[in-house]
Each structure stands twice: as C-alpha cells, then as structure tokens.
Image: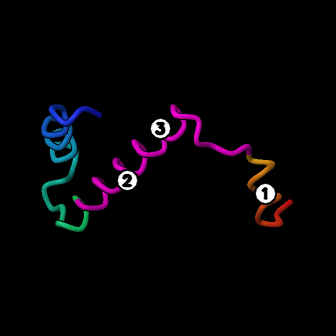
Amino acid sequence: MQTEGIKQEAYKILDQLPDQATWDDLMQQIYVRQAIEAGIKDSDEGRTMDIKDVRRKFGLK
C-alpha cells in the first residue's frame, strides 16, 4: 500500500469497529491488515514456498 493511502485505510478500519471497541481491538485489526499486506507483497515478489515443501521441511504429512 502506498503511504498516502494509509490514513484513509486507517479510517476504514476505525469505521468498521464497534463503538465499544478497545485499543487492543484496534491494534489487532491493524496487525492483521499489516500481516496480510506483507504476505501479498512476499507473494508478488516470489518469496513463497510450495505447501509440499513446507510440510516436508516440518516433517508433516
């Protein structure tokens, strides 16, 4: 996301929170949004692993 749009996106997050939301609720929503955007960026830049490779790395079936 471009820096100019962050303020507008923050307003959207605030508008979606219930009136009785806490600071922790707000921080959770911001963290989730940030994590999703980081994942999308990693994917766009080819920094991903196939699920089969991840399972093999961690010894999962």
Disc 1: CA contacts within 10 A as few (<14), some (14-19) or many (>=20): few
Measure the C-alpha gap from mark 1 to mark 3. Answer: 21 Å
The disc, 2 or 1, on the residue closer to the chain's N-terminal end is: 2
Residue at (28% x, 53% y) in the render: 30
Quadrant in the picture for residue 59: bottom right
Name the spot of residue 17 as percent of width and height, x first. Answer: 21, 51
* Residue topped by disc 3: 40
Measure the C-alpha gap from mark 2 to mark 1. Answer: 24 Å
Quadrant in the picture for residue 60: bottom right
Figure quadrant of the C terminus: bottom right
* Residue topped by disc 1: 55
Q: Does residue 30 appear to the left or right of 19 in the view shown?
A: right
* Residue topped by disc 2: 32
Q: Amino acid at mark 2?
A: Val
Q: 5 or 28, which is in the foreground?
A: 5
Disc 2: CA contacts within 10 A as few (<14), some (14-19) or many (>=20): few
Q: Is residue 31 above or below residue 15?
A: below
Q: Is residue 45 magenta?
A: yes
Name the spot of residue 12 as percent of width and height, x first. Answer: 19, 38
Residue at (37% x, 53% y) in the render: 32
Q: Is residue 53 above or below residue 9?
A: below
Q: Nearer the viewer, mark 2 or mark 3?
A: 3
